[in-house]
Image (spheres, rainbow, N blue to C red):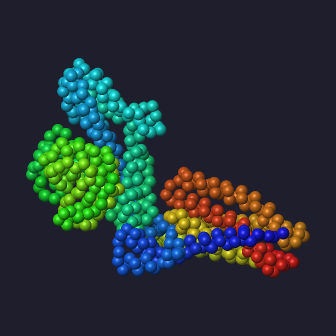
Amino acid sequence: MLHFPLWKRVLIWALCALGILFAMPNLFYERVESHNDAVKSLEAGQSGPELESAAARWPDWMPATIINLGLDLRGGAHLLAEVQMEDVYASRLDAMWPEVRDLLREERETVGTIRRQDGAADELRVRISTPDNIQAAVQAVRGMAQPVSSLSGVGQMNIEVSADGDEVVVRLTDAERVATQNRTIQQSLEIIRRRVDEVGTREPTIQRQGTDRILIQVPGIGSAEELKSLIGTTARLTFHPVVRRTDNAEAAPGARNALYPSMDQEGTYYVVEQTPVVTGEELTDAQPAFDQNGRPAVNFRFDPTGARKFGNYTAENIGSPFAIVLDEEVISAPVIQDHIPGGSGIITGNFTVEESTELAVLLRAGALPAEMVFLEERTIGPELGQDSIEAGRIASLVAFAGVLVFMAASYGLFGLFANLALLTNVALIFGLLSAIGATLTLPGIAGIVLTIGMAVDANVLVFERIREELKTAKGPSRAIDLGYEKAFSAILDANITTFIAAVILFAMGSGPVRGFAVTLGLGIMTSVFTALFVTRLFVIMWFERRRPKTIAV
């Protein structure tokens, strides 16, 4: 006999109500979006009547999560960047020079004097004054080798050391280059994601393409140039000993030195040691502030390793100038007045408040480990996105109307029950997408349209089984019960196979393919729920109220 216990009925209605509640904010998209932006600004410490008014436009007790619109629906910027890995390899080897130098100095009685030589970017060359002992120098430097820190490089070392006449040559091994490439790409992905998120954009698509390329898509941003100005800034902060100051832009800096212009004083240049004492990678925090004269500045703080290096250098070089360099420009070159043991300081310069805030954001997010070359850039206007939304809306409404008419014409009252369940199904899809913060794209709309068509499949199977049972002269109650019971396995098998396909698309695909897979997968789950429980509950409630002797499906 038809029977749903009270707890099951309450649970079904509660789930439907919860899904509709989470879907409702999407009916007031702009209002909820402005409310969310205002709340975030207020939580960040900003204030003002406009923010408070925008925050009050949506009730606090209502869910405020909405579906994020993708690049093809909202417009925005698209960039494809290539990471310059050769620069990373050169920096790795350059950073090894102080350790190699100190190691060979300890062997001075054997190898004699040492001097670094110019060479290819992917190698470090050191000449010794006693060529007969070159193998001893090679063995000493080989002691620096460390195991490659990646699963693909298990059992291999990070450097290979060889002799070339009277020179020791250090190179990265192939396994270390692969591990470095993977780390660099992952670090770049994370830094770009932090930079984009911190300036308030929504649901960016940031993913690796091939071995050394990164795809960046940010909905809602004004232009590709605006995105490039944020992402393309390396924001590499370094601290260098100053060799001398000059006004000659063509001055030869000398071996292992670099010539950088002053950011504040036009026509002034600094010759600094090329290898920095400490870098921005060892920063733990950076905040906009003001100096003692009320000018915009940036406070910074190092991690324990950076603080120790910074403190040791300032203690040993009191009275010497120390250059603070940002992207190969000297922000300032103050004279070290005293030992600075705390690992914190302040960057002053000719900043505006906006520039100091942006610099703090970039430094806090971290320096990009390598320069990126933008191979492709596109700006998608909001007008195109609006056209896509209209086309998707029309497609959805046409599909929806077609299914409703077909079900009502084919199954009468039971078709109307299926249509009510279909409306509930769509609300549940949007509620789930909102709850998980998913991004809706054109392929995602296609997934919803497909789900609308598939959502009635289960009902069709059930209703056809009920028709067959009615032909065997069973009563209506028994026919309905057997219809759901015998159709259950077919419904489950058909939807499980489609769900597996959606999972594979999500796991193997990227970008738009994943958006389609998400909406398809969620639609399968909600359609099975509404067909087996919501439609059945409608039928049971109608049957308990009318108690018909016969039914026509």
Query: Which residue sits at x=12%, y=54%?
Result: 268
Question: Is residue 132 placed above or below 397 in the rendered structure?
Answer: above
Number of labels in the image equals 0
Q: Percent x, y for residue 250?
A: 12, 47
Q: Please state if 324 lies on the left or on the right of 88 as rendered.
A: left
* Snapshot quadrant of residue 179: top left
Which residue reaches farthest right?
A: 473
Q: Percent x, y for residue 371?
A: 31, 50
* Snapshot quadrant of residue 486: bottom right
Do we see residue 525 in this rendering?
yes
Q: Name the image quarter holding the N terminus.
A: bottom right
Which residue reaches farthest top?
A: 132
Q: Percent x, y for residue 200?
A: 39, 66
Q: Percent x, y for residue 504?
A: 59, 52
Q: Please state if 200 lies on the left or on the right of 13 as rendered.
A: left
Which residue reaches farthest left?
A: 247
* Snapshot quadrant of residue 145: top left
Query: Which residue sits at x=77%, y=70%?
Result: 4
Q: Name the image quarter holding the C terminus.
A: bottom right
Instruction: Name the one closer to the observer, 525 or 15.
Output: 15
Query: Which residue sits at x=51%, y=64%?
Result: 437
Instruction: Name the one closer to the observer, 459 or 442.
Output: 459
Query: Which residue sits at x=72%, y=68%?
Result: 8
Q: Please state if 542 lies on the left or on the right of 472 as rendered.
A: left
Do we see residue 480 in this rendering?
no
